[in-house]
Amino acid sequence: MKFATIGHLRVEEDIHQFPKSWIQGDLAISPELNIHGTRGYITGLLLTARQMMELPQNIVRKKILDAAVFVQNSFGVDLIQLGALTTSVTDGGVWVTQQTEYTGFVNHGDSYTAAVTCQTVMKALTFFHKESSDEVLAIVGAYGVIGEAVSKILVPQFKQSILIGRKEEKLNNLKKSLQGNFSTTVDLNTIRNADIVVTATSHPTALLRSEHLKKHVIVVDVSQPPNLSYEVCQQRPDVCRIDGGLVDFPAQIPIPGMPVGKNFACIVEVIMQAMEDERKNHAGSIDLKHLRKTEKWGEKYGFTLKELTNFGKTITRTEEKNDN
Ligand SMILES: NC(=O)c1ccc[n+]([C@@H]2O[C@H](COP(=O)([O-])OP(=O)(O)OC[C@H]3O[C@@H](n4cnc5c(N)ncnc54)[C@H](OP(=O)(O)O)[C@@H]3O)[C@@H](O)[C@H]2O)c1
């Protein structure tokens, strides 16, 4: 199978991180990559996160479909990955699977992202010598594609969980699929009660402010663009922000903002699917059996979570001592 990822800019300045030769019309397209014999492309719509969420949805969807059809017809791509907010604006990718112009397979890559997010949370607890059964967890974006799977896996393991979204009805639906001690709310201020926060939202800019955060809270920030800004981290050295959804990946792929030797779990999932030649769609709600399979693929190929990072920088023991 030949893969292509379809992402977008986080902010306008990201465009300068692509070589000029990548820009073709309103798309950035990498040269053909060869990862252990599996070929594919990194592509990006030249729309910012804000534009992705604020332009009329039919316009954004058409650009995503045009990109999928272009890589299919020009390069023989038959597996696309819906990166960052392209999943959010296409009903978890389901809309793309329903379009007839693109005939290949679709994967949002959120299954491995959710798996790695849960691994990151457990690794962070070990790092800080904490037990999940003593801690309060908050999940922001709890009924999103990633948030729902993370909630199903983590909530039963924590003393208490606070599940946060924007719509009561969706929170009520989420409740039916969960076991454990949890409450649901639309009030972001309740994060203040949590010892560890997972944030996986489609909010196009930073969402968490200093006043939302308890002293010494751990924040696993999966969102792209990030939900916890560098500036808030500077103001609050007691807070430990950890990148969610980043794994070790030896091949260097030039993605704006990507630390050397790392890659997004969502991109890696689709590269692994192409390596495995698994001819299936993975769109919409996550199948936990598939999520576990992606973990096995990660181990098989060595694309796993090896260390905790914050904005790509390795988190060291000194982070524990910050007490401002
Ligand atoms: N690190 C990685 O490897 C990686 C991989 C994939 C995705 N991501 C990122 O992860 C995030 C989530 O992706 P996804 O595919 O799970 O998206 P999704 O299915 O669209 O879920 C996002 C959820 O966030 C909620 N939300 C948006 N704004 C909010 C706010 N202000 N307060 C509370 N909830 C809010 C949305 O609620 P409504 O439905 O009510 O709008 C939605 O349920 C995105 O930022 C994406 O770019 C990262």
Image: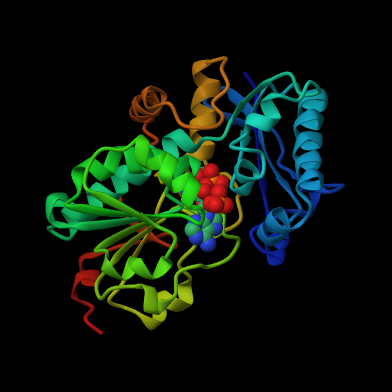
Kindly tell me whether residue 87 is visible in this rendering. yes
Give above or below for 319 relative to 267: below
Nearer to the camera, 303 or 152: 152
Measuring from the top left, give residue 13's x and y in whole percent: 70, 66
Nearer to the camera, 36 or 140: 140
Give above or below for 281 relative to 148: above
Measuring from the top left, give residue 227's x and y in whole percent: 49, 63
Give above or below for 203 relative to 208: above
Residue at 66% over, 39% down: 90
Give above or below for 29 relative to 302: below
Measuring from the top left, give residue 20's x and y in whole percent: 79, 54
Measuring from the top left, give residue 226's x and y in whole percent: 50, 61
Kindly tell me whether residue 226 is visible in this rendering. no
Nearer to the camera, 81 or 74: 81
Residue at 38% over, 73% down: 212
Say whether residue 178 is left or right of residue 181: right
| Quadrant of the rendering where the C terminus is positioned | bottom left
Residue 58, quarter of picture: top right
Residue at 13% over, 50% down: 133
| Quadrant of the rendering where the N terminus is positioned | top right
Residue 238, quarter of picture: bottom left
